[in-house]
Amino acid sequence: MERITIIGMGIIGASLGLALKGAKLKDTEIVGHPFNRDVTSAVKELNAFDKLESQLEKAVLGAQLVIIDANLGDTKYFLESLGNHLRDGSVITDTGTAKKRISAWAEEFLPSGISYIASRPIFSESGDDIKSARSDLFAGKQFCIIPAASASEQSVKTIVGLAETLDAKPYFLDQDEHDSYTAAMDYLPAVLSNAFVNATTASRSWKEMYKTAGKLFDAQSNLSSKDPVDTEIEYLAISDPLVYWIDQVIESLESLKTDISDGNDHLVESLITAWEERARWQSGAVERNQQDVTLPGAGESMASALLGDKLAQRMTLLGNPKKKDQWRYPRS
C-alpha cells in the first residue's frame, strides 16, 4: 500500500487530508502528523485522515509523497529531520510562501535520492480555524508548482497529479516569479496593516481617536495581529521582492496624496481604476481584452467640455449598457 503523509498541519493540511481521503485513491493510505495536541484533537473531529501518527519517523515511513504544511521555521526543521527517514524516490512538497529560501534548505538537507518540488495552493476564502477545513477548498483554484532545474520528470508529475486529484489548476512558475508575486499578494497587505496601526496609534489623539475606530479599523488592522516573530521571519526570508513592492506602494500613495491635495481630475480616475481592477479580479475578467475607445461621439464631446477628454471617454464607455461588463464601474 502506498502512503501520502501530511506533516505540520493548518487549515490547508487538514483540507488536503479531507480531499485526498475523499478521493478514495486506490491502495493509498492518508496519514497525518499534527504538531500539537490541540491540532490533533481538531483533526480527529474532522476525520480527515486514515491514520494520525504522533511520531515523525513513523508518520513518513514508506511514504511516497510528503506534504509539509507549517510556518517557515518549522518547515526548515522538518526538512532537516526528514532526510534520514524517507526512501529513495520519495517526493516532498510544502505549502509555504518563501520558495527560494525553502528550496535552498531542501537542497542543503535532503539526500540526492529524495526530490523536493515547491508548490502552493491559492485560494481567496478559507477561514482562520482548522475546523473550517473542507475537502473542496482547492476545487477550481490555482495550484502553483515551482520545480527546480534538477527535478525529475516523475517528481513533477507526482505534484501535478496531486493538484489534479484536488481538482485544482496546475500553475507553473519559477522561484523568483513566485516569491515576487507572493511578496505583493500575501506579504504587502500585512506590511500596510502594520504601518496603518503604527501610524494611527502613534498619534497624540489616539486616546480619544480609538473611540471612533469601528469595523474598517478592525478590517484594516487585522493582519497586524499575526505573531510578530513569525511575521519578521517571513519578511526577512523574502526581503528583496518585498522591498520592491513597498516602493511601488509608496509611489502610489505619493500620487494619491498629490491628487487629494490638488483636488485634480486624476483622483477620481485613480479611484475608478482601483474599483475596476478589483472587480475584474473578483469576476475572473483580468485576462479579458479591453477595446480602446478612439472616436468620440456627441455625448462624449459634451462631457469633455466639463470633465476633460480622458475622464469623459471613461464615463461614456461606462454609461453604455451595451458595452458594460460586470467589472466596469457602474456610472451613467
Image (spheres, helix red, strand yellow):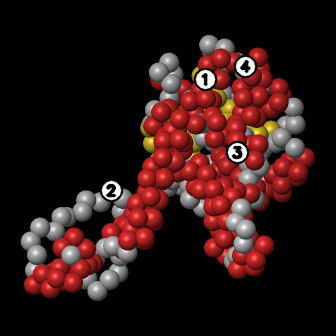
Give residue 188's position: percent from left, percent from top: 56, 50
With 207 as the anchor, is 144 left or right in this view? Answer: left
Per the image, label 2 sits on a secondary structure element best described as loop
The first of marks 1 and 3 along the sequence is: 1
Q: Amino acid at mark 3?
A: Thr
Q: Amino acid at mark 2?
A: Glu
Provide the residue designation for mark 4.
83
Of circles 1 and 3, which is in front? 3
Per the image, label 1 sits on a secondary structure element best described as helix
Of circles 3 and 4, which is in front? 3
Provide the residue designation for mark 1.
104
Per the image, label 4 sits on a secondary structure element best described as helix
The first of marks 4 and 1 along the sequence is: 4
Within 10 Å of disc 2 (Cα), the crowding (few <14, some 14-19, many 20+) is few
Provide the residue designation for mark 3.
231
Provide the residue designation for mark 2.
287
Foreground pick, 214 / 204 = 204
From this viewpoint, is residue 313 visible?
Answer: no
Q: Amino acid at mark 1?
A: Ala
From this viewpoint, is residue 35 visible?
Answer: yes
Disc 1 versus disc 2: distance between alpha carbons?
Answer: 33 Å
